[in-house]
Amino acid sequence: MPARLLATLLLAVWALPAFVVPVRAQTAAIRSAEVVIPQNMHIPVPAGLKQLFPQGFVPGMGFGLNCAIAQSDGSMVLHTLTGRGPVLPGPTVQQGGAWTGSGLFVLPGYTPSILTLKLSGNKAELVGAIPLCDEGGKPVSGLPPAPTVTGAPVVVPLDLGLGRLPFAATGFDPQGVAFDVKRGVYWIADSYRPALLRVSPRDGRVLEVLAAGGDLEDLLATHRPGWGFSGVSLSPVGKVHTMMRGVLFVNDVPAVFSRIIEYDPDSERVRQLAYPIDTETFPDRARVVTGDPVAYADKKVLVLEQGIDKEGKPRSLVFAADLSQGHNISRVFNEEGKPTEILVEPAQWKAAGTRLVKKTLVLDLQASGFSEPFVESMTLLSDGRTLAFMSGHGFGLEGQISGYATNKDGTPGLNPASYMLADGKGLVYGDQPSKAVFGIRPTREVPRLWLVTLPKKVVDY
């Protein structure tokens, strides 16, 4: 299960069935491909961790996926991302007079990278990496930038010793990648701000940042931590598409839709479309994860939608969204200055005269034989009918708490966010000082790639 789907999956119940076309997904063939990582591409670790990780860290990957081009030998080139590096949940800390969450950055100096895989048969080999750098050629960081928009989340970066790390002006959490053949650049989705990055394929330089609070509206920056942009794709007519990882909140009430962002680099026009959450399947719309849009035709986008269904089981669904059926909600507010997210009832949508996009079910991944809870990313291969999925891979490590506190019922206190770290003071659990130590240990987790061949091409759904 991806780390960002491990967050507790319980909240409000609501239904908006009118915008989903209930077409049963036909039988699809699924197979798994081994991801091969050469030893020389492992990540060196600090001296203090070499005993635990003698081969170094396995590169994290799967944070975004893109099909580049089929090769003459029948193989396929795929691009993916490392994300911001190995990061674990940390204690609740004081920041600006308030309490907020933190992240433990295992490698604070890590540089996010674009990875290239060569898929041949049932094997996908890691064959290249392009570290990202700023316009001056300096490596960028995986540390978060300081928030610049009112209402934007603050996640304080800490090292494993719980020491404060600086915010990074050129810090990025890349969660989507696509190669733009027409313009000769990569487009990368940054989850932090959120933002779209235009990146040179030659040396990984970030040439342009289209961020919330600037080229994109402030509202997008008010997402929950870890719920910024997810995935990016180029349409056949050259438009860039990305998507919010989930719904935004207004007055602590979750919206009934997630936003698809469409950017035209030629005209610099931005459109935003309301993608309705499938609340017939997922009763808790606040915890449904959306993303990895794949623009397979003009105004036609595949969307990966995941969550816990009414029976408490994980579900991963792929929908085809028709963007021509939705209205542009970019920078649209009512007379009280509230965004479209304020509309949560069908009658309100009708009264406002605003349409959501229409969507059709293409694939139910678990019903097709997929045995894992969730996937992290998705793309469509060049045959137009094979979907590729990757699991998020946390660099082969996980967090552990030694010397943990004990709850009143005798159970161990293993939730990092339940520990409080005040400025200049030690950890506190409940109302008692704690000697807990946050650390890491190896896991047997390995990146996996799954290939699902649909009974017909996506354009025929």
Image (cartoon, rainbow, N blue to C red):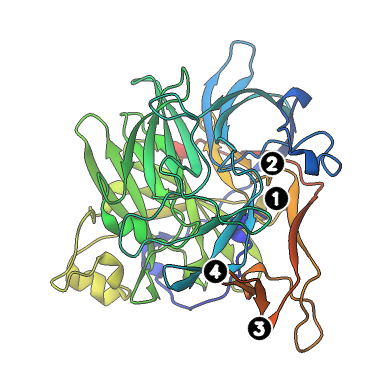
Mark nearer the N terminus (1 vs 2): 2
Return the residue at label 2.
30
Q: Amino acid at mark 2?
A: Ile
Q: Amino acid at mark 1?
A: Phe
Mark nearer the N terminus (4 vs 2): 2
Mark nearer the N terminus (3 vs 1): 1
Q: Which residue is depicted at the point 64% across and 59% down? A: 162
Crowdedness of circle 2 by 10 Å Cα count: few (<14), some, many (20+)? some
Q: Which residue is depicted at the point 46% across and 55% down? A: 245
In the rendered image, which quarter is residue 407 located in? bottom right
Return the residue at label 3.
430
In what element is the residue under mark 2? strand
Mark nearer the N terminus (4 vs 3): 4
Crowdedness of circle 1 by 10 Å Cα count: few (<14), some, many (20+)? some
Please state, as top left, top right, bottom left or bottom right, where the C terminus lies in the image: top left
Return the residue at label 4.
423
User: What is the spatial separation of the Cα atoms under label 1 and label 2, in whole angstroms?
Assistant: 7 Å
Nearest the viewer among 28 and 98 is: 98
Crowdedness of circle 3 by 10 Å Cα count: few (<14), some, many (20+)? some
The answer to whether the residue labelled 4 contacts the one labelled 1, judged by CB atoms less than 8 Å apart, is no
Mark nearer the N terminus (2 vs 3): 2
